[in-house]
Image (cartoon, rainbow, N blue to C red):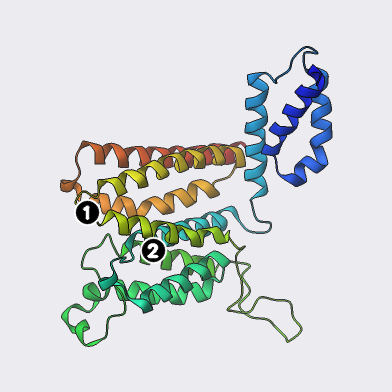
């Protein structure tokens, strides 16, 4: 294989960073431009070209992920609600067999599915049931004992914040302008009240709890649970860095808004347990807050330039 063919093959591999539809429309044009500008003796793309292609592919993928006809704030709020509810069920549902509530797990599955699929009104009803269940000791006090429990209940603020945050987010999405309440006639193409009112998210979100539950079950066999916290931090920090990059690439605030919504329950937990956090805890939550704040600032600046 000569130098030119080898270089072209490597360029084509780098173009896989772009979506397939984009490659079909512009791939050959990009290859021709890159080959004309390249050194005839070069066998590999220059590092600067490689980085430029990878960054460009990432930007195109982020922009193509935006749903058509949905305001950026609604899409960002929906994504944030999906993240909060999925992570809450992945990390808060009891996994020890003697603490499992079958009805609660069924509710969690139905609620997560409804949120992911964009059935906001159905999800709002289910989220309200879940929020009332976990908040019963705080709302009803000792008088709640006569009602059968079908899930966990908490007496602190931080464990119930994710549920009420999801209720608030779904309420906003359910009544947002442009949402159809019901079909006007039998042959109408409008969305019924139980139908989809937001674009569906990836069903891969449903695998997050399935992946986390066995890890938590294994973690309970150890006295030190810090490994779970370290695992969670190793995922959250890189993801928030990607969110910052996606915000700059997409030139809107949907990713930053989603990250801010996701961070709210964590900050409430941090504030409620300040005395239990050492330097590592302050550094960890400080870093997460800085990344989300940077994303919000970047979103504001990119929208100001637009």
Q: Position of residue 82 (x, y in %)?
A: 48, 60
- Density class for disc 1 (Cα within 10 Å; few <14, some 14-19, many ≥20) is few
Q: Position of residue 125 (x, y in %)?
A: 45, 77
Confirm whether residue 280 shows in the render: yes
Q: Position of residue 230 (x, y in %)?
A: 32, 43
Give SS at disc 1.
Answer: helix
- Determine which quarter of the picture holds residue 268: bottom left
Residue at 62%, 32% in the rendered image: 55
Label total for image? 2
Q: Nearer the viewer, residue 95 or 271?
A: 95
Which of marks 1 and 2 precedes in the sequence? Answer: 2
Residue 89, labelled with which disc? Answer: 2
Compared with residue 169, is residue 180 higher up or lower down, i.e. above or below? below
Q: Position of residue 58 (x, y in %)?
A: 62, 38
Q: Nearer the viewer, residue 19 or 249?
A: 19
Confirm whether residue 306 shows in the render: no
Residue 243, labelled with which disc? Answer: none
Name the residue tied to disc 1.
Answer: 272
């Amino acid at each position: 294989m000569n130098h030119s063919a080898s270089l072209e093959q490597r360029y084509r591999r780098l173009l896989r960073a772009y979506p397939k539809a984009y490659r079909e429309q512009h791939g050959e044009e990009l290859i021709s431009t890159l080959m004309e500008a390249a050194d005839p003796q070069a066998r590999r793309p220059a590092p600067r070209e490689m980085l430029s292609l990878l960054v460009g592919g990432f930007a195109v993928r982020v922009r193509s992920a935006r749903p058509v006809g949905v305001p950026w704030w609604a899409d960002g709020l929906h994504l944030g609600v999906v993240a909060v509810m999925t992570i809450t069920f992945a990390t808060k549902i009891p996994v020890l067999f003697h603490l499992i509530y079958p009805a609660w797990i069924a509710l969690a599955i139905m609620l997560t599915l409804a949120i992911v699929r964009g059935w906001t009104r159905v999800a709002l009803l289910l989220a309200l049931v879940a929020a009332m269940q976990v908040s019963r000791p705080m709302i009803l006090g000792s008088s709640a004992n006569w009602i059968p429990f079908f899930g966990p209940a908490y007496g602190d603020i931080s464990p119930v914040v994710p549920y009420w945050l999801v209720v608030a987010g779904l309420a906003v999405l359910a009544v947002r302008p442009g949402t159809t309440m019901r079909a006007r006639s039998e042959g109408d193409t409008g969305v019924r009240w139980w139908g989809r009112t937001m674009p569906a998210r990836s069903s891969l979100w449903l695998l997050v709890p399935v992946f986390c539950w066995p890890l938590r079950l294994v973690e309970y066999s150890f006295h030190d649970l810090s490994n779970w916290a370290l695992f969670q931090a190793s995922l959250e920090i890189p993801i928030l860095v990607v969110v910052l990059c996606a915000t700059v690439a997409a030139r809107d605030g949907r990713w930053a808004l989603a990250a801010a919504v996701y961070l709210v329950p964590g900050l409430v937990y941090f504030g409620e347990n300040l005395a239990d956090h050492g330097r590592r805890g302050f550094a960890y939550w400080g870093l997460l807050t800085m990344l989300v704040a940077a994303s919000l600032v970047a979103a504001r600046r990119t929208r100001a330039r637009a």
